[in-house]
Amino acid sequence: MSTWSLISFQDSASPTLEQMIMFHDFTMTVLTMITILVSINMIFIMKYKFTNRFLLQDQTTEIIWTLIPVFILLAIALPSLQTLYLLDDPFTPNLTVKSIGHQWFWSYEYSDFPQMEFDSYMLPAEETKTHNRLLESDNSVLLPTFTKVRMISTSTDVIHAWTVPSLGLKTDSVPGRLNQLIFMIKRPGIFYGQCSEICGANHSFMPIKIEAMPISNFIANIKLN
């Protein structure tokens, strides 16, 4: 993880997060321009005590500074709606995985492979071979790259949240309810996440570890398991 990712987004590994980053950058650009413009005007007014009565009471001026914010809001709202549509695009998935939250571990079921289900517990610190404290688990979620994946999430006890920041994924795992995420991973690698809902005393001990690999390697690993 880079230093920049600590204050911004993690490196994108899915089109989902790419769309979110693009919208974030566009919105921040607009907000920065507004902040600079307003600051300059405030400094100008305080320095020169600008109190032109035609500027303060003119009808044309009133119309202009009412319409400009409307156009700015439309410029932000339209890309926002487009991004929401792309994130919820209900395409037909090639693979379905079900995540089930427990206190305090995850269970996974591969709907397309009836015998493929397992529990995923956090590895103790003394067994962790990397520096990813509280993120390593004994069983990883294996997923193929460039494949449409549907993740269905639920819970057996309290509300959890299945979250993987580098993929731009987050959904609540609610008892008695099925929520879904549809995504695609664009590069091989290991991606970490955690339960992001305060679900109890061991809330921080529910890591999520995804191993993304080419589909040929994925099929070979599934056969071995």
Image: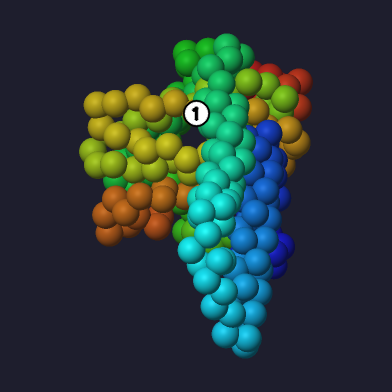
Q: Nearer the viewer, residue 211 or 40?
A: 40
Side of 7 relative to 123 (left or right): right
Amino acid type, residue under disc 1 in the picture = Leu
Q: Nearer the viewer, residue 73 or 15?
A: 73
43 to 202, vertically: above or below: below
Q: Quadrant of residue 32?
A: bottom right
| Residue denoted by label 1 | 181
Q: Position of residue 34 (x, y in %)?
A: 62, 61
Q: Nearer the viewer, residue 5 or 209?
A: 5
Please name the residue shown 67% across and 48% down the image. 26
Residue 89 appears in the rendering: yes
Instruction: Name the quadrant of the C terminus.
Output: top right
Q: Position of residue 13 (x, y in %)?
A: 69, 40
Please name the residue shown 29% across and 46% down the image. 103
Q: Quadrant of residue 204?
A: bottom left
Please name the residue shown 70% across and 64% down the image. 4
Side of 84 relative to 145 (left or right): left
Instruction: Name the quadrant of the N terminus.
Output: bottom right
Q: Position of residue 56 (x, y in %)?
A: 51, 67
173 to 117, vertically: above or below: below
Q: Position of residue 50 (x, y in %)?
A: 59, 80
Residue 224 appears in the rendering: no
Q: Nearer the viewer, residue 35 or 26?
A: 35
Please name the residue shown 61% across and 36% down the image. 79
